[in-house]
Amino acid sequence: MEDLSRFFNSKKVLITGHAGFKGSWLTKILLNWGADVIGVALKPDTSPSLFNLLKIKDGIKNYFCDIKDFEKIKKIILKEKPEIIFHLAAQPLVMAGYDDPLYTFRTNIMGTANVLQAIKETDCVRSAVMVTTDKVYEEKEGVYYKENDKLGGYDPYSASKAGAEIVISSYIKSFFNPEDYKKNHQTLVASARAGNVLGGGDWQKNRIMPDMVRAIFENKNKVIIRNPDSIRPWQYVLDPLHGYMVLAKDLYEGRKELSGAWNFGPDEGSYIKTQELVEMAISFLGFGSYIVKKQPEAKHEAPVLKLDNSKAKDILSWKPIFSIDKTLEFTTDWYKSFYEKKDIIDLTNKQIKLFFGKK
């Protein structure tokens, strides 16, 4: 992947949500490759946080502000003049969406609109990848969701992300239409939908891996599995990030036919039940145990989520690099190293090099 690292070297890249889990990994990759990174996010809301552990703030132009504040977002873009934007800032949790739906809608829908409007009004961005989720689709049983399938959203989080997709599509058609590229505008925009990412450094609540490591390492308790039969598109965090970067590069280089929606999901072998995932992770850790404790009045979550990744494979020449085994090996090794107080920056850099050396 040397061509990708060479491309991003010295590029001005703005990442919203850079203080989050995926945002911190993306920022670290781009810093390692010599990019000039600008970060826009709220302050980390977990302790510990990957952002602080990797000392991300030291290597970038850092702005802590709310994505819902259009004037501030526009001012930052106007000042920094990024060539490429990755929009990851969001309220990212299904359960938090139930707890505070209005905040979720404002952040995920209007936050996305704010970034797109700021891009429109500042005229410096050539490529923008707007990250949503695999949960934007209307629920159906037994299908792999394709990019042109109907959008839905049972719960507020999913609906907010489907709403963000509608906003993105509207801006593409109205202001960043590929047919008008290099005539009325110079920006190509796409959305990216990934699965349930796993990797070291995630400490959000109500996510299976952070909940598991906290139970095992901190509380010395059994892991509680509430939805043992749920099937998700489990994938290593760097797999979708790799897809986002390939997409951003190709858009920057003028491939206007790529504007639109993209799935970056795993291959078939990574679609396993939550209980199986926990059993495999405990096996890699070498210790730990679990109990199944279903909640009779649990809030709704889709029982099965599967993404069709054939479009990205065929057109972008992207493919998932890590199997579920390799994903869990890298993820559990990261957490073990953290709790053993090893050099986490060094380990993170090694995992990035090993991953991108696979192709």
Image (cartoon, grey):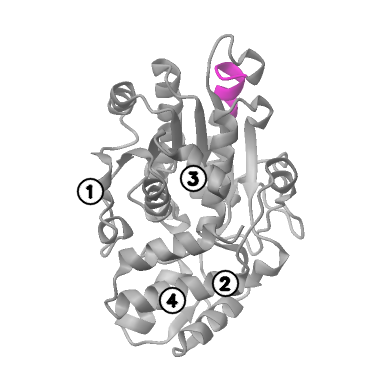
28 displayed left or right of 251: left
The dot on residue 333 is: 4
- In this view, the residue in front, 105 or 318, is 318
The first of marks 1 and 2 along the sequence is 1
Find disc 1 in the rendering and name its residue. Answer: 58
What is the three-letter code of the residue carrying label 4?
Answer: Asp
What residue is drawn where x is 71% and y is 48%?
313
Spot occupied by residue 133 in the image (x, y as percentages of width and height): 55, 48
The dot on residue 298 is: none
The first of marks 4 and 3 along the sequence is 3
Spot occupied by residue 171 in the image (x, y as percentages of width and height): 55, 23
Please check the rendered image and state whether residue 174 is part of the magenta-colored stretch, yes or no.
Answer: yes
Magenta residues span 169-177
What is the three-letter code of the residue carrying label 2?
Answer: Lys
What is the three-letter code of the residue carrying label 1?
Answer: Asp
Pointers 4 and 2 in contact (C-beta within 8 Å):
no
Q: CA distance from mark 4 to mark 3?
A: 25 Å
The dot on residue 326 is: 2
